[in-house]
Amino acid sequence: MTNLLEQEKREQTSPITTLPFPPVTPQHILNTSFHSWYPRFRSMTPKARLIPLSQPFLDYLRADGIILPPEHKSSTSDAEDSGYDDEGSDDASADTELDPSESWADVHAAIATTIRDLGGKVVPKLNWSAPKDATWIATTNDMECRTPNDVYLLLKSSDFITHDLEHAFDGCVLPELADDALPHVPYHLVLRKAFNLNPSLEFRCFVRQRRVIAISQREMNHFDFLFDLRDRFGRLIRDFVEDRLVAGFPDENFVADVYIPPPHEKVWLIDVNPWAPRTDPLLFSWLELLTLEVPAVEEGKESSQGLPRTETQPGANGDDGREEFVRLTIQSRATCPAFSEYKHEHELEQEVQAPLGTEGDGDDESSAGSEADADVDADADSETIFVPEFRLVNRDDPEAYQFSATKYSAHKLPKDVVDASLAPGGMKDMMDEWKRVMERQQQESDTDTDSDSGTKYRAMSDERC
């Protein structure tokens, strides 16, 4: 018994070496794919269109290099009737006639049509990720696309898109299958109607066991006006997620990105992310989120806001409209008129008999009061109201004023290069050292080549002998 107690004590005091994540399955990753959750929450999501992607188009995205389809295809008959011939015309025509979209012409046409239907400007993303890290290559330095080629340029230049294509199930616990095969991913191109999204009004909320446990600011800069709106935004987000998202999402743990545009009365769902280490916890740490103690709420009891739980059901005609109702717990004695009249008469009788009371009456009254206080304290202890922490970037935080800083690692320089640029003559010293390293590697390569050649020559001589 003593050994068991000592072992349990060691386990409690030993440091955590790995994050206590629940097993992340491929099905959980698929549930957070846009094509999976969008049909359920379409009425609360900005307007978007989904285009199924064919295998030739996926091969085009995975291929090295960036070759864009021609903007305007010229007919071969015009070229034949022009009567103009030149020595370099063959090479020039070969370059201009190269069209990678011939094998996925249906996808190309669907993208062009969708852009026109959504007003001429769209924002692309794949099943999970948007090419935010590739905006540097766009002429407008943002993700707004006006032509299919704008879409292809962003997708092929993004490491985030490559991750969706090649590493979607990294870190997942595979089910017990005979061949450990990964599930098929029905890739879709998501084209959202472009609108003026204010990044300061986008927030990330963390849902564990179907309860909002934390909310974080999405844009890592300080916005002073958010602190006056924090309580209001917190209530809006909790009501939206717990009353509308939780019931329709298949997993009990997930991370949702929401947006509250002016006049700050409606919450929009922007994205759903997996409850996995790949999702950025922003102003929190995953250790905080995984070890946070949250009191459980029984079914039919009060919500996490301490308010009567509001439930929603689909409309009777199957449309997107929802009927809302509030579930109240009614105590019949407290609301019964007969009990109220009896209680009132009893209080009046006690007031009349108080001056004529005996010592025993005083003791009974004090004991009754103490019992009532004990009941109130017990009720207060049993009603634990949990309000998730809502973190914003404070004025003195290191992230407060990084408006011009690069956000993604693909855009950043190595620390050695940055340090060298700050020191006088540092760049020259670094380049000289780099040159010496390259020369040393070249010499070692030449030495290995000479030794291999000498060995081969001696082997040939031995064969002649």
Image (cartoon, rainbow, N blue to C red):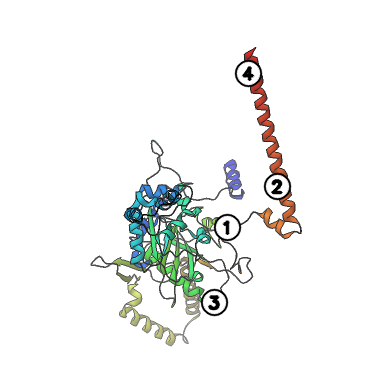
Is 203 left or right of 27, judged from the image as shown?
A: right
Judge depth for marks 2 and 4 and give the one in front: 4
Front one among 105 and 253: 105
Residue located beneath label 2 in the image:
434
Judge depth for marks 1 and 4 and give the one in front: 4
Is 204 left or right of 322, judged from the image as shown?
A: right
- How far apart, in angstroms, are the residues tagged by discs 3 and 2? 49 Å
Query: How many residues crowd mark 1 within 10 Å: few (<14), some (14–19), many (20+)?
Result: few
Residue located beneath label 1 in the image:
411
Res. 2 in view: yes
Residue 254 location in percent, x, y?
A: 44, 57
Where is residue 177, by image quadrant? top left
Res. 248 in view: no
- How far apart, in angstroms, are the residues tagged by discs 1 and 3? 30 Å
Between discs 2 and 1, the one toward the N terminus: 1
Front one among 364 and 52: 52
Q: Kindly check if marks 3 and 2 are in contact, taking CB atoms under 8 A apart as contact.
A: no
Is 101 left or right of 132, judged from the image as shown?
A: left
Front one among 39 and 321: 39
Between discs 3 and 2, the one toward the N terminus: 3
Outermost residue toward the right in this view? 424
Front one among 116 and 132: 116
Tell me the kind of residue under disc 2.
Trp
- How far apart, in angstroms, are the residues tagged by discs 2 and 4? 39 Å
Query: How many residues crowd mark 2 within 10 Å: few (<14), some (14–19), many (20+)?
Result: few
Outermost residue toward the top in this view? 465
Instruction: Name the mark on residue 460.
Output: 4
Residue located beneath label 3 in the image:
225
